[in-house]
Amino acid sequence: MAQVINMPRLSDTMEEGTVAKWLKKVGDKIEEGDILAEIETDKATMEFESFHEGTLLHIGIKEGDGAPVDSLLAIIGDDGEDISALVNGANETPVEEKVVSDSGSAANVQDETLSNTGPVEIPEGVEVVKMPRLSDTMEEGTVATWLKKVGDTVEEGDILAEIETDKATMEFESFYAGKLLYIGIQEGESSPVDEVLAIIGPEGTDVNAVLNAKPGAEISVEAKAETAKEEKRSVPAQEDRAVITDGQRIFASPLAKKIAADKGIDISNIPGSGDNGRIIKKDVENYSPSQATGPAVKEVANSDTASAITPMSLPVGEEGSEEIKNSSMRKVIAKVLGQSKFTAPHFYLTIEVDMDNAKASRVQINSLPDTKVSFNDMVLKACAMALRKHPQVNTSWNGDTTRYNKHIHMGVAVAVDEGLVVPVVKFADQLGLTQIGGAVKELAGKARTKKIAPSEMEGSTFTVSNLGMFGILEFTSIINQPNSAILSVGAIVEKPVVKNGEIVVGNTMKLTLACDHRTVDGAVGAQFLQTLRHFIENPVTMLA
């Protein structure tokens, strides 16, 4: 019996997942425990294994696509098993079902009906657009960009999409007018030549009926498409014509015209590289004013006052931008930090810490065999000890109640390629400096290689964010809820300081505490920072 596999919830905050990579394809045999896919959550990319065995019959979410938790991910069952009801929904009635009498069978009735009705005709005015053959060696094409979306009005000559062939990426224009009713190949997807690319027709057309049309009707569609192409070759569309001063006619694609208009460029000055000198998108994008040879330029060059005109040197460049699909991690970061910033009343307290003793102590500690302690490890240990003395900071706001955490779990902000994750060093107040250093190094390594488990990023009661290694002197952070506070650690700087009434060279570091005013008052935050400064400036107190 077929088993439906839904998008799993792989972290406590996960609301949707993205299939980074399928490790199995439709038709493969699946054993229990086999890795089906790598799924990107809001925190990491994780391997997802099968709890069933059988044949992979259906993939519901393609590589690179995201979908909410519990969406149909895949179906596993027996080879050849009918899964149409599972894919299309249990309530959908199959088209082939017929009510028959006791003396006949459904198959006979269906065959008789088809033989009487013949091929299903495509409604008048509806056009099925196929993946075109844009080069002599092209066998399949990839839709690089759709320039129209379902529901848009399409005019004859409009550019529908940019299609990548085996040789180049080319604009593909419509030979028909109407509403774009259906897109058969999504951006980034590939398909063989003559696969259904789109359907154009009157609004309200039954798209399913068109898609289910019999082959006989498809031939008429291809014939109509070829006729339209021939008509277009023989009579160029009015919007593809432009007349310049010498009476010549130029041709340009609608997209090229639009880009030229947006840039304020006279399209008659642009040389075309398309068929028969047609101006296309890249011609406009690569055009610079120095290429202009229009009448106005010639007129100035031939005038008696040309020598008195000093050419103005204007900057020449190309505007450009790129939109990149947000990863699940990036979207969750935006959501969680936005909620924190706009729901928790933040306030900030900053102190400057003398780091002379810390630097000297670190040298001594690291001189021991197999020992490596960073300044960040010392800050984490000091925070854990200060939280023990100031439990008000180690809290969470729960609306009607405030939760006082008796355990101390330190979150450590770690930058990764897609954004930010916060591994958690648990029971940090009970760990020594070297133990904290080893735990942070291991967790950060897992986070950067996307091998960290969700359980290793849950349960923090306080968070530390350190940008000092990037030379940042001072900054503020957004509280990592449900924590009540987060500490921002700046760089250690060498500068003149006053000690015992004399100006000497010293080493200082700025720490900024962001507090949730619902749980932590200003005086409580200030007392916490005083205790924190005492531990950092006297590292020997953290070795007990």
Image (cartoon, grey):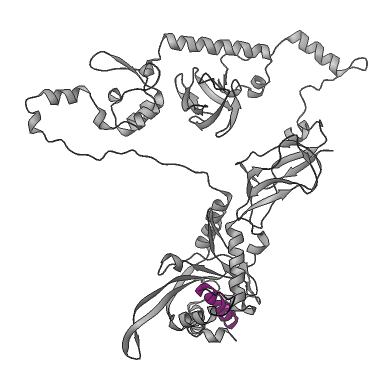
* Location of residue 433 by image quarter: bottom right
Camera-side residue: 112 or 172? 172
Residue at 67% x, 17% y is 213
Residue at 62% x, 67% y is 424
Q: Position of residue 22 (x, y in %)?
A: 67, 42
Q: Position of residue 436 (x, y in %)?
A: 60, 74
Q: Is residue 379 magenta?
A: yes
* Location of residue 248 by image quarter: top left
Residue at 53% x, 11% y is 226
Residue at 32% x, 90% y is 501
Find the residue positioned furthest to the right: 103
Q: Position of residue 215 (x, y in %)?
A: 67, 14
Find the residue positioned furthest to the bottom: 500
Magenta stretch bounds? 368-392
Q: Is residue 271 magenta?
A: no
Image vertical order of residue 67 relative to residue 344, above or below = above
Camera-side residue: 87 or 434? 434
Q: Position of residue 80 (x, y in %)?
A: 81, 30
- Residue 115 visible in rendering: yes
Image quarter of the N terminus? top right
Image vertical order of residue 62 relative to residue 202, above or below = below
* Location of residue 368 by image quarter: bottom right
Dominant secondary structure (helix, strand or loop) of the stretch shown in magenta: helix
- Residue 482 visible in rendering: no
Image quarter of the C terminus? bottom right
